[in-house]
Image (cartoon, rainbow, N blue to C red):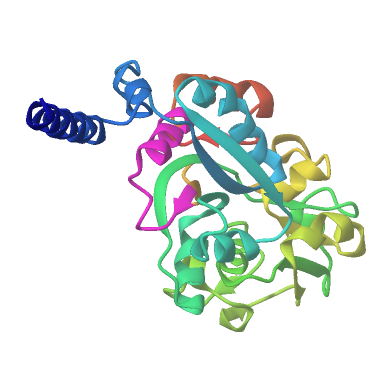
Amino acid sequence: MKKLSAALVALLFVLALAACGQKIAEPPASSAPAASAAPGTSKEVTLKVGASSVPHAEILNNVKAKLKTEGVNLEVIEFNDYVQPNVQVFEKQLDANFFQHQPYLDQFNLDKKQNLVKVVGVHIEPFGAYSQKVKSAADLKEGASVAIPNDPSNAGRALALMEKNGLIKLKDGVGIKGTVQDVVENSKKLQIKELDPAMLPRNVGEFDLALINTNYALQANLLPTKDALFMEDKNSPYVNILVSRPDNKDSEAMQKLAKELNSEDTKKFIEDKYKGAIVPAF
């Protein structure tokens, strides 16, 4: 009997070990919910996009709700300068920005040794010339003061627009890359001063003429189609673009944003809200 009992105890001990081994090999209970998750579901992705408040942030905010239904949480961070939005995208504090045109981006990349890239073009903001002192460019007197943006791409843009309207002549071939030093004819001896673009609307009364980016003009309640003495036409090469980094420009969330910015809903929003002061570029 003692031998039988000993054998029985040994057998029970072996069976217990086998049972324990089976329990260890079983998948953990926490894996069950993942297996039962509905096919096609994914975690919401957040995109942080820097933008000028008008019109860029307004356009972005208009597509927020639609993107939310597509699993993209769009965070719009407003800026009042043309430097930090690019710096913060490059440093990965932002995913993208929306405030600039391609000539400005090209110059910024060159100057700062960055490699930011266009994702999609959205709209054109016709550049305009404004005055509180004269009613037309022909009324400008000799020695009149003219303010233009101080960043290279927009300064060249302003000078090219002045040339097109007969105020100055630039050195042959410089086009939109012209600088004040490239002015070869200035029959009215206009005094051209460069200012920070954001300062121009606030200082328009201090000059006889000020050439202002439309986003800043709109913030000052200046409507190009109504208030500008002259402005760019629809053939302007300065399409405003969504910009990101090479490593994320083709991400699913970024492409969803690009698609919504080029949608019929966005086109209608731009046309209805801005009444021709801003023109869709798609």
- Viewer-side residue, 204 vs 75: 75
- On the rendered structure, is 175 left or right of 217? left
Q: Quadrant of residue 34?
A: top left
Q: Is residue 267 visible?
A: no
- Seen in the picture, residue 149 relative to 221 is either above or below; the reply is below
Q: Quadrant of residue 167?
A: bottom right
Report the residue that reaches farthest toward the front. Answer: 1
Q: Position of residue 192 (x, y in %)?
A: 74, 74
- Seen in the picture, residue 67 relative to 216 is either above or below; the reply is above
- Seen in the picture, residue 105 relative to 274 is either above or below; the reply is below
Quadrant including the N terminus: top left
- Viewer-side residue, 267 vs 22: 22
Q: Position of residue 28 (x, y in %)?
A: 32, 31
The residue located at (63%, 50%) in the rendering is: 127
Assess whether residue 222 is covered by the magenta stretch.
Answer: no
Q: Is residue 29 visible?
A: yes
The residue located at (46%, 36%) in the rendering is: 281
Q: Position of residue 78 (x, y in %)?
A: 70, 48
Q: Position of residue 170 (x, y in %)?
A: 54, 74
Report the residue that reaches farthest toward the bottom. Answer: 181
The residue located at (91%, 58%) in the rendering is: 205
Quadrant including the C terminus: top left
Q: Which residues are magenta?
A: 242-261
- Viewer-side residue, 62 vs 34: 34
Q: How many circles with numbers are drawn on the protein?
A: 0
